[in-house]
Image: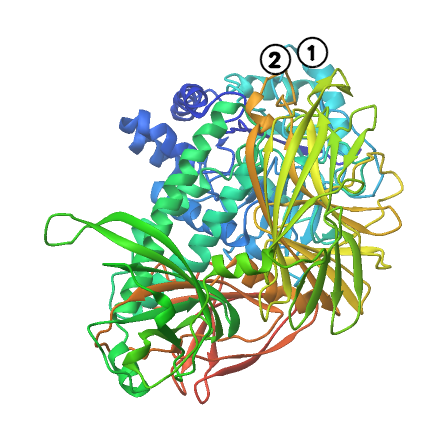
Amino acid sequence: MPQQKTVHIISHSHWDREWYMPFEKHRMRLVTLLDTVIELLESNGNDFHYFHLDGHVLLVDDYLEIRPEMKQRLQRLIADNKLFIGPWYVLQDAFLTSGEAQLRNLQLGIERAEQLGAATRVGYFPDTFGNISQSAQLLLGFGIETAVFGRGINAIAENNTVVNEGSNGYRSELWWEAPDGSRVLSVFLANWYHNGMELPINPVAAKETVSLTVANVEKYAATSHLLLMNGCDHQPVQRDVGQAIKVLNDNLQNYRFVHSNFPDYLREIALQSTDLQSVRGELIGQQTDGNLTLVNTASARMYLKQWNAKVQLELERWSEPFSTIAWKLGAVYPEAFIDHAWKQLLENHPHDSICGCSIDEVHQEMVVRFKKANQVASELSEQALSFITNQLNTNKLVEELGIRNINDQLRAIVVFNPLGWKRDDRVEAELDCEDEKDLQHYSLLDPLGNSVAFSYEDLGWIHGFTLPLDSFRVPWKKRRYLLKFQAEQAPALGHTTYILVLREAQNLNLPAKRTQRREAQLINNRETTTFCLENEYLYVQVEKNGTLVMRDKATDQVYKDLLVFEDNGDVGNEYMYVASEDGSVFTTKGSEASIEQISSSQIRIIHHLSIPFERQAKLRSEQLVSLRLDIRISLEKGSRRLEIDVSGDNQAKDHRLRVLFPTNLVTDYCYADAPFDVVRREIWPWSGWENPSRTERMQSFVDVTDGDNGLMIASIGLPEYEILRDGHNTIALTLLRSVGELGDWNYFATPEAQCLGSFTARFAILSHTGGYVEAIPDVSAFQTPLRSVVSTLHEGSLAATASWLHLPNKSIMITSFKKTREGAHAALRFVNLSSESQEIELGGGWIKKDSQIAVARLDEKVIGQQEVLNGSVNTTIPAKKIATWLL
């Protein structure tokens, strides 16, 4: 007689907070759902024992805002292991949010769940549009040893069917490994998260329906424990599931049906885990036909991705690290405000939110949340930088430079660098004066007294106000000047100070500096038809059609036809790009661009591209409209990156705009950064791939290299790319995608997804030798320009130049520097992005000599110690390892 198998029936409702209805409408149904769930769980004799609240805890707070009187009842059910919540704060998209954002998502989710009774320690990814490579390491860093996911390996099985059965050999129970070797016991929802919904209580119907359902589960199962998910999207709870289970046990003798929960189910799976398969790295559906990966959510409503990148960078690179430094110097650490900003941001990270695949009203509310999060984050950054500036002894620096203070004509310009290594880079400073000044009579001195060339713009009179802490607001009117100069050797995660001085205050006879406007005027008067930019590393020439020829001086490698803009028809939806059936493509390659040399470091290119106005069925219309593209390309002194800013006015519908970069490098692979990783992806798809499109996602860069030379495209908030199989390995970067409907299970018009009106895009071209690691510092510098604070002179206890931490290894990326959740420590987190172990040396003013540093998990629980000798730490970091040290 065959062994009796146990069928675990888990009651749940997959709950998108916002999607085809806005948040408040969904919440009204959520309140009804949880009212019912509480009633069922508190009742005796109905055989309803457990309910899984979809893995994200924010739903509970959404409910309690309406039903605050239910808090104690909820807490009791959670503590009694009847209602399962968490561990996430929200069910985020895994590819369009940063690694740190996902880590804070777990951190805040677990904290809140424990406040409410208990956190369910299961990594739950039921509907993420693919799964990132570092998930196992991320989960284990919080003590979570199991995961459940719904996409990424086999094709999705809808309506209790089996799709592509056995196409890649993966079973539903398996080990999921991260690149560093971490692994978690996992269950793939091969028959989706609705395969046990609405179980019948009629014996005949139950036997017929469930026999087929269970058989399909068995086709993927690797153990004797089978899973039926009793629920679906916003599904009302099945009140009589206990009666249905009794009927099943009476009519299907080879199975034992139980009302279950994930901890119990996964415990049983673990007992039979000895011979399970393993899957490694990211799960993005590469062994499917490619039509339902939902990857094009990376380009739906691109403005959301740009907002997200902006706020993430503000929090991770500025607000947290410099608030931590200010705390070290005596300021109060603003943890409550930082948490508030993160929570506002995380509310935009659910997959149907950040992916841009909801109705218009949802995304209107998202923009408000982004703005609110950015208001808090930017204010925290400004306060921290100002506090640090006020601690500097700028008087001492002036004295050391031998400068006489004449009528208070001096200013200190403090330059801040948030990266883990020294850098030479461009910096801007806003100088506000009580009256007009002729800055040609001023000199800018570095900390050693060397004169630094600068340019400036007179921005005119501005009005502002200050809000003193001990008196009423004070309005003011000042003359603002924008200074630009090259900062050299800006200290790692630290600051340095420049002095702007009236020339008669020093014994110098320096030449006057020209303003940018004058320089532009001189260059524009030249009689030349060659438009080029050049510095120590690159020579770039603009052709008549606006394309670029770029030569890397170190290697003599030349890239041609860069910066062609391509427009295709799109008859798909917010989830999927579908090319129009006419296959029409409009490009700027055969046109003649308007080109203007703005300065020695900047060129302006203008295109007028005529494209179809809209779609007609599955074709593009014959009516054309003009798409004006205004492009600024910049190459600064000492920079290895060519920076490009694009602005345009989109008046067309149903299309996709991309920019092309032929690499002509021979390789079968490309590299793209992902949360806490850089992944290698094959350019040519699996043999069963049918989708003509082969787009993929990145966090901030994609790289094509043949091992000797490489071309990398870095972006800010432009996460979709494709490597064209055109014989040139051309990188195609998506700038804009316009569609008019949501897609999925019904027709939902989304006119605002056409993204009509003005748009911008910012990206950079990087030429490098060797592999992608060589260009990582330049990507970080591109994403994080130096910042400055202009100050009057004053006494202070802090040196005018200082580095708090330096970690000068191209493969090592500092992802976070913040105060710990508990105790008086700073938590430093970094990751080895290379595929090899790396020797590192961590030093800086924060490190105490001959001491110890606590090594912690990602949740900041101490697991070891690291020795400090002579003020630095020398150790080896394994490949792809995420490390957290408490200083």
Residue drawn 63% across the image and 22% down it: 740
- SS state under label 2: loop
Give left or right: position of 375 versus 295: left
Q: In the image, is residue 886 above or below residue 578?
A: below
Labelled pair 2, 1 in contact (Cβ < 8 Å): no
- The C terminus lies in which quarter of the figure? bottom left
Q: In the image, is residue 673 above or below residue 213?
A: below
Give left or right: position of 723 versus 459: right
Q: Amino acid at mark 1?
A: Ala
Q: Is residue 82 visible to the viewer in this orientation of the structure? A: no
Q: In the image, is residue 608 above or below residue 275?
A: above
- Name the spot of residue 363 as percent of width and height, x first: 49, 29
Q: CA distance from mark 2 to mark 1?
A: 7 Å
Q: Tell which of 803 and 594 is nearer to you.
A: 594
Q: Which mark is residue 205?
A: 1
Snapshot quadrant of residue 748: top right
Tell me if mark 2 has few (under 14), some (14-19) or many (20+) residues whose alpha carbon lies within 10 angstroms of its own: some
Residue drawn 81% across the image and 29% down it: 584
- Name the spot of residue 668 as percent of width and height, x first: 85, 55
The residue singled out by tag 2 in the image is: 201
Q: Is residue 778 visible to the viewer in this orientation of the structure? A: yes
- Name the spot of residue 310 as percent of width and height, x first: 48, 48
Give the tally of numbered discs: 2
Residue drawn 67% across the image and 29% down it: 626
- SS state under label 1: helix
Residue drawn 34% across the image and 68% down it: 325
Snapshot quadrant of residue 254: top right
Snapshot quadrant of residue 78: top left
Q: Tell which of 514 and 259 is nearer to you.
A: 514
Q: Amino acid at mark 2?
A: Ile
Q: Which mark is residue 776?
A: none
Q: Tell which of 846 and 49 is nearer to you.
A: 846
